[in-house]
Image (tube, rainbow, N blue to C red):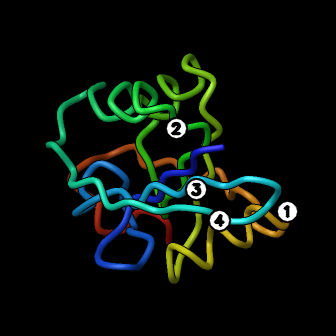
Amino acid sequence: MRIAVASEGTNVTGHFGHCDSFIVFDAENGAIVRQENVPNPGHRPGFLPNFLADRGVNVIISGGMGGGAVEIFNERNVEVVVGASGEAKDAVERYLKGELVSTGSVCHEHQHHDECGH
């Protein structure tokens, strides 16, 4: 299973499209076996969900995310978990234990991206 976390440094970011990078974790048997940092190649409508799905990502974790990105992830069968915060690795470990639940925090206005996930 591949789990990507939209991140700022080592923390989950508040808005998916404006993150610095994605920390991609590979998990087997409920444990993280590998992680890599993938720089955000740029925020363009519809690009990032396909970019991550094409890299084999099964789950995306973020603080908040726009509705368009959620729709594309859903079409690509990538599970969306929003409302997360804190350390990216901790969020993934909580997800793997079934303790991280999506709040459904969808951002509707990009000019307010700093308020997403709150």
Q: Could you tell me how far apart the alpha carbons at marks 1 and 2 are, in whole angstroms?
A: 18 Å
Closer to us: 17 or 50:
50
Alpha carbons under labels 2 and 3: distance apart: 15 Å
The residue pinned by badge 3 equals: 82
Q: In the image, residue 12 lies at what x, y percent?
A: 45, 71
Picture coordinates of residue 111, whole percent (x, y): 20, 53
C-beta proximity under 8 Å, tags 3 and 1? no
Q: Mark 3 to mark 4: distance in Å? A: 20 Å
Query: Which structural element holds mark 1?
Result: loop
13 displayed left or right of 71: left
* 2 and 3 marks in contact (CB < 8 Å): no
- Tag 4, which secondary structure? strand
Q: Residue 98 carries which label?
A: 1
To which quarter of the image does residue 68 belong? top left
Q: How crowded is mark 3: few (under 14 residues within 10 Å), some or many (20 or more)?
A: many
Classify residue 94 as left or right of residue 80. Answer: right
Residue where numbered disc 2 is placed: 57
Q: Please state which amino acid type lies under the numbered disc 3.
A: Val
Mark earlier in primary sequence (2, 3): 2
10 Å crowding of disc 2: few (<14), some (14-19), many (20+): many
Decide which of tag 3 and tag 1 comes sooner along the chain. Answer: 3
Q: Label 2 amino acid?
A: Val
Residue beneath disc 4: 32
For the residue pair 27 and 108, the one nearer the viewer reads as: 27
- Compared with 3, 74 (above or below) is above
**Nearer mark to the viewer, of 1 and 2:** 2
Residue kind at label 4, given as amino acid type: Ile
